Every structure is written in C-alpha cells, then in structure tokens.
C-alpha cells in the first residue's frame, strides 16, 4: 500500500515543516529546508489541513472498502464505485475477495483479479493462466453503470501477454481470437484515474500513450516528467537538488548508456501525462507523433519541433543538460537507484519554477538503446517511484521561523 509521505518521513528523519499535495518539506537546520516531491498526489486536504495519503483499504459501513482520501470504493465481490458510477467483472466461479493492504484479491476459475486503491483513482489487473472459452471470455470484461465522475479519466482496456504483445479491446470476437494465440499468463488492465499537471510519460510510440504505465523502458527515446513545485515560495533560493530513479527490470546484460536530463522547450511545455496504459492515446494525450493526440490514432497538435518528438537535444527540448550525466549499465541489479545531481543551470531552472511559475518539466534521455525499466510515479511500490529532492532557503514569504521552531518542539 502507498503512504509515500510517511516513507519520506522515515527515510529523511527530519521534522516536517510543511505538507502540500505533491510534496513534503523538512527542516534541515541552519535555515535550510529540503522538500521531496512525487509525481503523484501524496497528501489530501481535509478541513484545511493536509494529511498523508494512505491507500490502505478500510471497511466502510456499507460493506465496501475505501480510504479517507478518495471517493473510490471497492467490494469483496468485485464491485467498484466512484460517485454514481459502478463497474464489476463477473468472472467465472469467483470466490469472495480477500483484503490485502491497498487491494482486494479475487481468485476465479482460471486466474486472479487484483483491485487496487490508488492515490488518484483505481487500478485493476486480471491475470489469466489459460485461454478462456467464448462463454468465459465475456465475463472478463467489466460491466458498467452510471457516469464516471468528470475528475476521472478511463483507460482503454488492454491485455498484455507473457511475451509483451499488447491487445487493445474493441470487441469480444477479436479479443477471444487474440487470447487464443497469446502467451500465458495474460494481464488485462482497465483503470480510471485523475488527471494531474505532474507525472511522467514515455514518448516512444507513434500512437500509444503510456501515462498510466508503472515503468518506463529506457530506450533512446525521451520520457517526460514534471514535479509541481508551487509549495516552495518564489522568494526562496535553491541551494541543491537531486532526481532519483529506481531500476525495476532489466532484459539484457551487455549494454551501457549515458543518461541525461534537459528542460522541455517552452512551445512543448503544456504537455500532459495522460491516463492510458500502452493504449491508443485519448484526445489530448501525448505520443511520439503528437503533443496532443486526436483520440483516433492521429494528431490534434504536433510537437513544436515538427514531426515526431526528437531524441536530439535542441529540437523538442533544450540542449543544456541540467544535471551530472549518469551511466546506465544493464548489468546493474534491480533496485539500483540512479541519482542525478543538478548543476548550476539545473538549480537556476528549478528556482525559476518555484511558486506559481510555468513548469515545462524535464525530458529524460538515454543516449543509446538500453532495455532497462525505471519505476514511474504510478508504480505500486512507493519506494520505486521517482523523487525530486530540492534543498532551499526560505525567502521573506517562506516558512515562518516560529513555525520551524514549533516543528522542532513537536519532533522532540
């Protein structure tokens, strides 16, 4: 289950001086504050107070399970609700689900279904171990009723087999034909989530969006990331910063590559993450060929560099590297953490994004093709998610000294 803010408190061991939707600020002493930022929401507001999001499922009076930060509710029988919306996959010979932290696990005749609470929505994974019959296949697709609240965006239903082949659901007949030829196990993944100005997305396919993917393949195509820094006063001064990524999967052990980060150009700065997971981009979502897709495999708004998003610095993103270069090695073990240390140009850029300033986000690029996967802001293991850590000194409108003193007293 995810309690990202609590994880940062445990790892940092410093008194908290400020909480915000996407970050948590700690007092380092000597007038310095370090703020750690996530691409996903890490706090929710209740009666004017920011509280850490904990996705652990709690029993509600109506028999559903939920979390204080969300209006999503999940039942052991597979029902999922959000406002007036409801969905359920009937499955075949499904047993009553078992609550396991942030998810309900349902066993059925030829597989297992996982129903996850997320910080900003809901995630489902249905893993099947053999081809279904025609009668069984129809029960894998969730029935729906009511309208999904407008704050959520639905991901298209996709299925991925053991060899990485992807099928995007259109109708039951095509789905059944694909399943008959697939390599098992197969994972079926219908989700919905809220949209955010932050997050990260891989830009490596002409028509597909990866905004909801839990990992990013570090090929020689950029991926984009953005952290919301508005909780740091524009009067503050940045003194240091790092950006950390965690290796979650390696598919080859014979390659190395340089890894760099750059600022996205102003003309492309209004990109969004999107909510698809290796599926045809919905309208407005980014792909390799479109800053905003048209929702039907085409382009609504092109990248400002012209044509496809380029892997060449200076075209769709700036040519000045913002941090020390890192070397990726496919021989590194899973859970290796790669940490960028921002240089003077990077520190200056971050500082310009404090407060309500426009934030174009970063383009992160491996200079050669290396089949390595980094955890994204969507990863269910919170320690695998990217972390931007910014050290700053508060300006005249920063955290008041009496508040810092109060925080120190509470930590003792």
Image: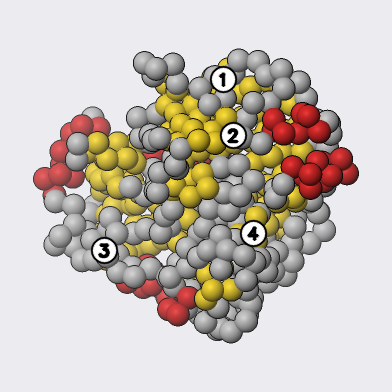
Q: Position of residue 99 (x, y in %)?
A: 54, 19
Q: Residues within 10 Å of mark 3 (few under 14, many from 20)?
A: some
Q: Indicate which disc residue 143 carries.
A: 2
**Residue 408 visible in the current orientation:** no
Q: Nearer the viewer, residue 65 or 157?
A: 157
Cα distance between the residues tagged 1 and 3: 45 Å
- Tag nearer the camera, 1 or 2: 2
Q: Is residue 253 above or below residue 267?
A: above
Which quadrant, please, contains the C terminus? top left
Q: Residue at x 79, y 44 (%)?
A: 173
Cα distance between the residues tagged 3 and 4: 35 Å
| In the image: residue 312, left or right of residue 174 | left
Cα distance between the residues tagged 3 and 2: 44 Å
Cα distance between the residues tagged 1 and 2: 13 Å
Q: Position of residue 122 (x, y in %)?
A: 50, 38
Secondary structure under tag 4 reads: strand
Q: Position of residue 408 (x, y in %)?
A: 21, 38
Marks 1 and 4, the one that precedes in the sequence: 1
Mark 2–mark 4 contact, CB under 8 Å? no
Q: Nearer the viewer, residue 44 or 73?
A: 73
Marks 3 and 4, the one that precedes in the sequence: 4
Marks 2 and 4, the one that precedes in the sequence: 2
Q: Nearer the viewer, residue 209 or 336?
A: 209
Residue behind mark 1: 77
Cα distance between the residues tagged 1 and 4: 30 Å
Residue behind mark 4: 280
- Tag nearer the camera, 3 or 2: 2
Secondary structure under tag 2 reads: strand
Q: Residue at x 46, y 37 (%)?
A: 146
Residue behind mark 3: 355
Cα distance between the residues tagged 2 and 4: 21 Å
């Amino acid at each position: 289950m995810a309690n990202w803010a609590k994880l940062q408190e445990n790892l940092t061991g410093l008194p908290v001086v400020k909480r915000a939707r996407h970050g948590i600020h700690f007092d380092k002493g000597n007038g310095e504050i370090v703020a750690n930022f996530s691409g996903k929401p890490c706090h929710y507001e209740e009666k004017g107070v920011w509280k850490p999001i904990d996705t652990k499922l709690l029993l509600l009076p109506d028999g559903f399970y939920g979390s204080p930060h969300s209006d999503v509710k999940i039942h052991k029988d597979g029902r999922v609700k959000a406002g007036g919306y409801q969905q359920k996959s009937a499955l075949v010979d499904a047993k009553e689900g078992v609550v396991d932290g942030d998810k309900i696990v349902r066993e059925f005749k030829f597989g297992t279904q996982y129903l996850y609470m997320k910080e900003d929505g809901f995630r489902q994974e249905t893993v099947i171990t053999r081809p279904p019959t025609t009668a069984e296949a129809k029960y894998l697709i969730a029935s729906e009723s009511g309208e999904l609240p407008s704050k959520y965006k639905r991901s298209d239903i996709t299925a991925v087999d053991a060899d990485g082949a992807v099928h995007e659901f259109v109708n039951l007949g095509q789905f059944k034909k694909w399943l008959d030829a697939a390599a098992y196990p197969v994972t079926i993944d219908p989700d919905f989530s809220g949209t955010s100005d932050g997050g990260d997305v891989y830009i490596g396919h002409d028509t597909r969006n990866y905004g909801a993917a839990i990992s990013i393949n570090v090929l020689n195509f950029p991926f984009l990331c953005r952290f919301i820094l508005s909780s740091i006063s524009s009067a503050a001064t940045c003194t240091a910063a790092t950006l950390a990524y965690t290796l979650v999967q390696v598919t080859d052990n014979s390659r190395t590559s340089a890894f760099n980060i750059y600022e996205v150009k102003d003309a492309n700065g209004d990109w969004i993450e999107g909510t698809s997971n290796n599926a045809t981009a919905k309208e407005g979502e980014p792909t390799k060929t479109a800053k905003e897709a048209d929702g039907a495999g085409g382009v609504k708004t092109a990248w400002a560099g012209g044509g496809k998003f380029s892997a060449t610095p200076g075209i769709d993103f700036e040519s000045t590297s913002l941090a020390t270069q890192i070397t990726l090695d496919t021989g590194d073990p899973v859970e290796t953490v790669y940490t960028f240390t921002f240089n003077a140009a990077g520190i200056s850029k971050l500082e310009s994004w404090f407060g309500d300033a426009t934030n174009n986000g970063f383009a992160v690029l491996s200079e050669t093709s290396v089949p390595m996967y980094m955890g994204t802001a969507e990863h269910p293991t919170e320690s695998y998610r990217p972390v931007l850590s910014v050290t700053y000194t508060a300006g005249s409108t920063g955290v008041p000294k009496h508040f810092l003193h109060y925080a120190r007293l509470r930590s003792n």
